[in-house]
Image (spheres, grey):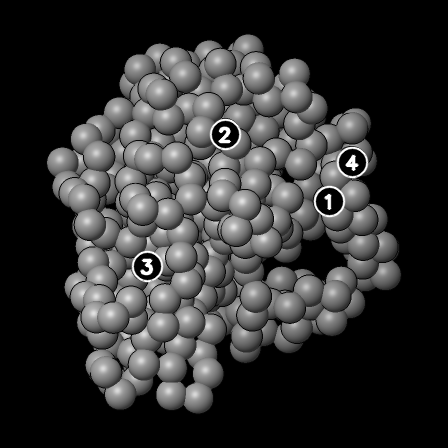
């Protein structure tokens, strides 16, 4: 199943009113300015519904991509409890509950009472067997902590408190926007938590992040989700993209998955972003234990493999076959011992 297909999502949205568009533009300005967490700006349940069917659904495509990658790697959550920290309208936990059915309890945390109520009502309708609460956030070793699109709103003290909570959980899945700034801050989170966790994804190793070297300062660890195909056939999504100024084809994100499991078998690499294709070859930004480096893959060396890498059809993790510093082949990788 390709990212997003067969999962929840209302791809046939109603017509937007001028007020809808005004609300959506105002929300986007807050997101881009990083001020969305300054106050509870939800004015009505209708605003939450509007957000949930547009911006939140777009975030859902990123969660789809993360969960699909974990499936390809052979990893799944072993926890039975969820805490969605900064839950908003609940897109993250709904995607996780649809993927892994073993969860029996969900705790919601958000500074907005209206958002918590919206998320609770929606998840109770879709997953009636899950117990939903929203007390002060707490975790156990059986808790999967979900964090989504909060890092640009968190002051240092707030981030420190969240990391203390994360250290006591059993697993963490953290998804953020694919900007340089947000990715770099998420790398900081990885470095501060890898003393107690194994990085499961996107990393293939437990060493210091290779992006932290001076030569890699211009780069950042980001990836691209693919929207479900019905989105491109829906006039309302086209209207949303045009009026708000969003390219539906480009859905960049950064993410981090942490668990208390053995490290992945040595020797695998993870493609960062997408290969940059030129005439007869592609440049692949690759992360591995030795660091982050850009490799050349020539089409003439491995035409079938070149095509698969360009399309991303084999997944993002590989054991490269190298000759003379160039990629000449490889095999996809999975997580061992997870």
Q: Spatial distance from mark 2 to mark 4, Cα to Cα?
A: 21 Å
- What mark, if any, has residue 35 been given in the picture? 4
- What mark, if any, has residue 189 been given in the picture? 2
x, y percent for residue 42: 76, 35
Quadrant of image for the C terminus = top left
Label 4 neighbour load within 10 Å: few <14, some 14-19, many 20+: some
Q: Earlier in the sequence, mark 2 or mark 1?
A: 1
Cβ–Cβ under 8 Å for marks 3 and 1: no
Vertical position of residue 219 compared to residue 300: above or below: above
Identify the image quadrant of residue 145: top left
Give the number of the mark in front: 3 or 4. Answer: 3
Asked which secondary structure carries label 2, the reply is helix
Question: Residue drawn at (55%, 60%), measured in percent from left and top?
Answer: 251
Question: Residue drawn at (36%, 66%), measured in percent from left and top?
Answer: 295
Label 1 neighbour load within 10 Å: few <14, some 14-19, many 20+: some
Give the number of the mark in front: 3 or 1. Answer: 3
Vertical position of residue 40 compared to residue 67: above or below: above
Q: Earlier in the sequence, mark 2 or mark 4?
A: 4
| Mark 1 lies on residue | 31
Asked which secondary structure carries label 3, the reply is loop
Question: Residue drawn at (31%, 15%), measured in percent from left and top?
Answer: 141
Identify the image quadrant of residue 252: bottom right
Please indicate whether residue 323 sits to the left or right of residue 114 in the image. left
């Amino acid at each position: 199943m390709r990212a997003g297909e067969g999962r929840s999502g209302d791809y046939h949205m109603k017509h937007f009113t001028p007020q809808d568009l005004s609300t959506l533009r105002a929300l986007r300005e807050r997101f881009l300015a990083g001020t969305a967490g300054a106050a509870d700006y939800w004015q009505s349940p209708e605003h939450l519904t509007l957000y949930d069917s547009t911006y939140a659904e777009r975030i859902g495509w990123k969660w789809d991509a993360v969960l699909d990658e974990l499936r390809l790697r052979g990893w799944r959550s072993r926890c039975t409890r969820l805490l969605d920290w900064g839950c908003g309208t609940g897109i993250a936990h709904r995607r996780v509950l649809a993927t892994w059915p073993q969860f029996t309890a969900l705790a919601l945390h958000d500074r907005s009472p209206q958002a918590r109520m919206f998320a609770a009502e929606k998840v109770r309708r879709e997953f009636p067997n899950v117990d939903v609460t929203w007390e002060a956030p707490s975790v156990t070793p059986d808790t999967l902590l979900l964090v989504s699109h909060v890092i640009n709103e968190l002051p240092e003290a707030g981030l420190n408190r969240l990391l203390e909570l994360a250290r006591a959980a059993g697993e963490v899945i953290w998804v953020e926007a694919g900007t340089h700034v947000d990715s770099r801050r998420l790398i900081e989170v990885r470095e501060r938590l890898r003393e107690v966790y194994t990085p499961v994804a996107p990393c293939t190793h437990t060493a210091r992040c290779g992006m932290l070297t001076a030569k890699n300062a211009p780069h950042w660890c980001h990836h691209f989700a693919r929207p479900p195909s019905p989105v491109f056939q829906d006039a309302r999504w086209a209207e949303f993209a045009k009026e708000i100024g969003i390219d539906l084809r480009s859905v960049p994100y950064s993410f981090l998955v942490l668990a208390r499991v053995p490290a992945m078998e040595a020797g695998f690499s993870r493609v960062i972003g997408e290969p940059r294709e030129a005439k007869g070859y592609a440049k692949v930004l690759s992360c591995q234990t030795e660091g982050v480096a850009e490799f050349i893959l020539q089409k003439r060396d491995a035409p079938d493999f070149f095509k698969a890498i360009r399309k991303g059809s084999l997944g993002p993790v590989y054991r490269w076959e190298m000759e003379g510093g160039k990629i000449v082949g490889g095999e996809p990788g999975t997580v061992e011992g997870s």
